[in-house]
Image: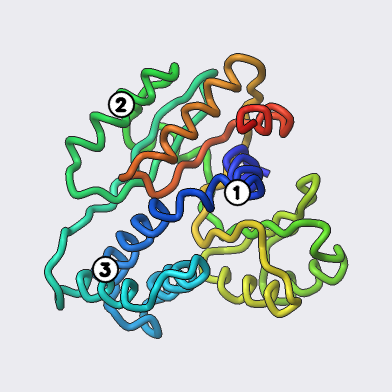
Amino acid sequence: MSGHSKWHTIKHKKGALDAKRGKIFTRIIKELSVAARSGGGDPAMNPRLRTVIAEAKSVNMPNDNITRAIRRGTGEEDGVSYDEITYEGYGPGGAAVIIETLTDNRNRTVGELRHMLTKYGGSLGETNSVAWMFDRKGYIVVDKAAAEEETLMAAVLEAGADDMGDDGDSWGVTTEIGGYEAVLEAVKALGIEPATAQAMAMLPKNTIKLEGKTAQQMLKLMDALDDHDDVKQVWSNFDIEEKEIEASMA
């Protein structure tokens, strides 16, 4: 499992993500607007919008909020316009970091991210400085307690998944971007609610092992970036033991 995915899954299990529902709603509203602006307001004709709407409903976002966000994206209602910008850089120990943002002020965002990276022993890099280290895939994590291996594997492979791997306490399913929805539906058809489901994950080709003080610095950086209002998603290729991740959240 990628470092980010392991960190995200443990954080979710501890309820840390649920405690930030306001931040989650804000991010999803931005994503709905951007998806509608780029591909239109009809989810039947806009796969990206359809995926974001499904996420909005999974966190019980009211339908009125969803509709207003889409209408702002299509220009039917006034509102702030957001740009999607991806930044790349390095964290402590040389771990690669990709930061996906939704912002209405590029200068503010890049300045704050640069300061944050420097504070925790990292640095901002140029475009494509680390992106080549990752593959963009659909990624679904299922707790082992929720699924029998052979049944899950048969269902996801039949639905078009690329692979299913053993991630310790969970199974990690990877898919091509275009096949993500079909595989996710196959998982849910088994009565399973995934621990994590990401339509466009950045999965590292190789990982870098971090321990001790460097690992704790990296986790502090991840938390700080995740808390930033303009940050949509953070990806990294760090590999940190679960016990160290859990200790950082204690």
Task: Say few, some or many: other residues with alpha carbon within 10 Å of mark 3 (under 14 / 14 to 19 / 20 or more).
Answer: few
Q: Is residue 37 left or right of residue 76?
A: right
Tell me the quarter of the image containing the C terminus.
Answer: top right
Q: Which residue, given by chain and number where applicable, does mark 1 sit on?
A: 15
Whether pointer 2 and pointer 3 mark residues with C-beta atoms closer than 8 Å, the reply is no
User: Which badge, 2 or 3, comes first in the chain's sequence?
Assistant: 3
Question: How far separated are the C-alphas under marks 3 and 1?
Answer: 33 Å
Q: Is residue 28 above or below residue 13?
A: below
Q: Nearer the viewer, mark 2 or mark 3?
A: 2
Q: What residue lies at 48% left-to-right and 70% top-to-bottom?
A: 60
Q: Which residue, given by chain and number where applicable, does mark 3 sit on?
A: 38
- State the image coordinates of residue 83 (x, y, percent, origin top left): 23, 53
- State the image coordinates of residue 181 (x, y, percent, origin top left): 56, 73
Total number of numbered labels? Answer: 3
Whether pointer 1 and pointer 2 mark residues with C-beta atoms closer than 8 Å, the reply is no
Q: Is residue 206 above or below residue 9?
A: above
